[in-house]
Amino acid sequence: MKTDNGKDLIELVENGKHLSPVLPDHIKNYLIDIDGTVCDDIPNEEPERMGTAALFPDALDTINKWHDEGHVITFFTSRVEEHREVTEKWLNENGFRYHGLLMGKPRGGNYHWIDNHIVRATRYDGKFTDLVEKQVSIQVFEQ
Protein backbone atom coordinates (compact mmCIF):
# COMPACT_ATOMS: atom_id res chain seq x y z
CA MET A 1 0.00 0.00 0.00
CA LYS A 2 1.23 3.52 -0.77
CA THR A 3 0.35 7.06 0.30
CA ASP A 4 -0.97 9.61 -2.19
CA ASN A 5 2.68 10.69 -2.46
CA GLY A 6 3.89 7.21 -3.43
CA LYS A 7 5.41 6.41 -0.02
CA ASP A 8 5.18 2.82 1.20
CA LEU A 9 2.78 2.24 4.08
CA ILE A 10 2.70 -0.66 6.52
CA GLU A 11 -0.72 -2.27 6.75
CA LEU A 12 -1.86 -3.11 10.27
CA VAL A 13 -4.42 -5.76 11.18
CA GLU A 14 -5.68 -6.39 14.73
CA ASN A 15 -8.20 -9.11 15.53
CA GLY A 16 -8.92 -9.50 11.83
CA LYS A 17 -9.73 -5.78 11.36
CA HIS A 18 -7.65 -3.32 9.40
CA LEU A 19 -6.24 -0.32 11.27
CA SER A 20 -4.94 2.91 9.79
CA PRO A 21 -1.66 2.19 7.99
CA VAL A 22 1.63 3.71 9.19
CA LEU A 23 4.84 4.84 7.55
CA PRO A 24 8.01 2.81 8.14
CA ASP A 25 10.00 3.95 11.21
CA HIS A 26 12.73 5.55 9.09
CA ILE A 27 10.26 7.86 7.28
CA LYS A 28 8.88 10.96 9.00
CA ASN A 29 5.69 12.76 8.05
CA TYR A 30 6.76 16.40 8.54
CA LEU A 31 4.02 19.02 9.02
CA ILE A 32 5.75 22.38 8.73
CA ASP A 33 4.29 25.82 9.43
CA ILE A 34 5.14 28.65 7.04
CA ASP A 35 4.76 32.11 8.63
CA GLY A 36 7.32 32.70 11.35
CA THR A 37 8.85 29.26 10.74
CA VAL A 38 10.29 29.21 7.22
CA CYS A 39 9.80 32.91 6.44
CA ASP A 40 8.71 36.26 7.86
CA ASP A 41 5.69 36.03 10.15
CA ILE A 42 2.90 37.45 7.98
CA PRO A 43 -0.68 37.54 9.28
CA ASN A 44 -3.63 36.69 7.04
CA GLU A 45 -4.73 40.32 7.33
CA GLU A 46 -1.71 41.36 5.18
CA PRO A 47 -1.77 38.92 2.23
CA GLU A 48 -0.05 41.44 -0.03
CA ARG A 49 3.21 40.62 1.83
CA MET A 50 2.98 36.84 1.32
CA GLY A 51 4.50 36.83 -2.15
CA THR A 52 7.66 38.63 -1.04
CA ALA A 53 8.25 37.08 2.39
CA ALA A 54 11.91 36.77 3.32
CA LEU A 55 13.08 33.17 3.61
CA PHE A 56 14.69 32.17 6.93
CA PRO A 57 18.28 30.89 6.79
CA ASP A 58 18.71 27.12 6.43
CA ALA A 59 14.95 26.44 6.12
CA LEU A 60 15.08 25.62 2.41
CA ASP A 61 18.23 23.47 2.60
CA THR A 62 17.04 21.53 5.65
CA ILE A 63 13.53 20.86 4.36
CA ASN A 64 14.75 19.89 0.89
CA LYS A 65 17.32 17.57 2.50
CA TRP A 66 14.52 15.85 4.43
CA HIS A 67 12.53 15.55 1.19
CA ASP A 68 15.54 14.02 -0.59
CA GLU A 69 15.95 11.53 2.29
CA GLY A 70 12.46 10.25 1.50
CA HIS A 71 10.45 11.97 4.22
CA VAL A 72 6.99 13.35 3.52
CA ILE A 73 6.92 17.15 3.56
CA THR A 74 3.58 18.89 4.06
CA PHE A 75 3.24 22.58 4.80
CA PHE A 76 0.47 23.18 7.36
CA THR A 77 -0.40 26.86 7.57
CA SER A 78 -2.92 29.20 9.16
CA ARG A 79 -3.22 30.93 5.81
CA VAL A 80 -6.71 30.50 4.41
CA GLU A 81 -7.73 28.87 1.13
CA GLU A 82 -7.84 32.23 -0.70
CA HIS A 83 -4.06 32.48 -0.04
CA ARG A 84 -3.28 29.09 -1.65
CA GLU A 85 -2.18 30.47 -5.03
CA VAL A 86 0.26 33.06 -3.62
CA THR A 87 1.53 30.49 -1.11
CA GLU A 88 2.18 27.79 -3.72
CA LYS A 89 3.85 30.35 -5.98
CA TRP A 90 6.13 31.53 -3.13
CA LEU A 91 7.05 27.95 -2.14
CA ASN A 92 7.83 27.01 -5.74
CA GLU A 93 9.74 30.21 -6.57
CA ASN A 94 11.88 29.69 -3.48
CA GLY A 95 12.65 26.10 -4.50
CA PHE A 96 10.86 24.12 -1.77
CA ARG A 97 10.28 20.45 -2.56
CA TYR A 98 7.15 19.22 -0.83
CA HIS A 99 4.27 16.80 -1.13
CA GLY A 100 1.31 18.77 0.18
CA LEU A 101 -0.04 22.07 1.44
CA LEU A 102 -2.77 22.17 4.09
CA MET A 103 -4.49 25.52 4.59
CA GLY A 104 -6.58 26.74 7.53
CA LYS A 105 -4.57 25.55 10.56
CA PRO A 106 -6.15 27.10 13.68
CA ARG A 107 -4.54 30.40 14.61
CA GLY A 108 -3.17 31.33 17.99
CA GLY A 109 -0.60 28.69 18.80
CA ASN A 110 -0.51 26.74 22.08
CA TYR A 111 -1.28 23.62 20.04
CA HIS A 112 -1.95 20.32 21.72
CA TRP A 113 -2.33 17.59 19.13
CA ILE A 114 -4.26 14.45 20.10
CA ASP A 115 -3.98 11.53 17.70
CA ASN A 116 -3.92 7.74 17.71
CA HIS A 117 -0.57 7.84 15.87
CA ILE A 118 2.81 8.86 17.25
CA VAL A 119 3.12 12.65 17.25
CA ARG A 120 6.35 14.51 17.89
CA ALA A 121 6.48 18.28 18.03
CA THR A 122 9.44 20.57 17.53
CA ARG A 123 9.07 24.28 18.13
CA TYR A 124 10.95 26.44 15.66
CA ASP A 125 13.11 28.81 17.67
CA GLY A 126 15.16 30.71 15.11
CA LYS A 127 17.33 28.09 13.39
CA PHE A 128 16.74 25.11 11.11
CA THR A 129 19.12 22.19 11.68
CA ASP A 130 18.94 18.44 11.69
CA LEU A 131 16.84 17.24 14.61
CA VAL A 132 18.57 15.85 17.71
CA GLU A 133 17.33 13.51 20.45
CA LYS A 134 16.59 15.06 23.87
CA GLN A 135 14.78 13.86 26.98
CA VAL A 136 11.92 16.22 27.84
CA SER A 137 8.75 16.30 29.89
CA ILE A 138 5.46 15.94 28.00
CA GLN A 139 1.77 15.77 28.84
CA VAL A 140 0.08 12.42 28.16
CA PHE A 141 -3.23 10.73 28.94
CA GLU A 142 -3.26 8.78 32.19
CA GLN A 143 -3.26 5.05 31.41
Image: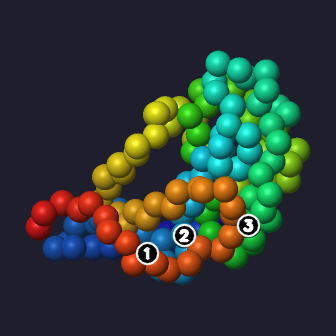
User: For mark 1, what is the residue?
Assistant: 10
Numbered badge on residue 22: none
Q: Pointers 1 and 2 in contact (CB under 8 A)?
A: no
Density class for disc 3 (Cα within 10 Å; few <14, some 14-19, many ≥20) is some
Residue 69 in the image, given as x and y percentages of width and height? 70, 76
C-alpha separation, residue under disc 1 versus residue under disc 3: 26 Å
1 vs 32, left or right, is left
C-alpha separation, residue under disc 1 versus residue under disc 2: 13 Å
Instruction: Please name the residue shown 85% across and 53% down the image.
Output: 95
Foreground mark, 1 or 2, reads: 2
User: For mark 2, what is the residue?
Assistant: 28
**In this orientation, which residue lies closer to the viewer: 39 or 85?**
39
Identify the secondary structure beneath mark 2. Answer: loop
Q: Earlier in the sequence, mark 1 or mark 3?
A: 1
Instruction: Please name the residue shown 46% across and 33% down the image.
Output: 108
Residue 120 in the image, given as x and y percentages of width and height? 43, 65
Give amino acid for label 2: Lys
Instruction: Please name the residue shown 71% across and 55% down the image.
Output: 98
**In this orientation, which residue lies closer to the viewer: 76 or 125?**
125
Residue 56 in the image, given as x and y percentages of width and height? 77, 52
Asked if residue 23 shows in the view, the reply is yes
Q: Residue extending furthest left?
A: 143
Q: Is residue 103 above or below residue 13?
A: above
Q: Quadrant of residue 19?
A: bottom left
Q: Earlier in the sequence, mark 1 or mark 2?
A: 1
Numbered badge on residue 62: 3
Give amino acid for label 1: Ile
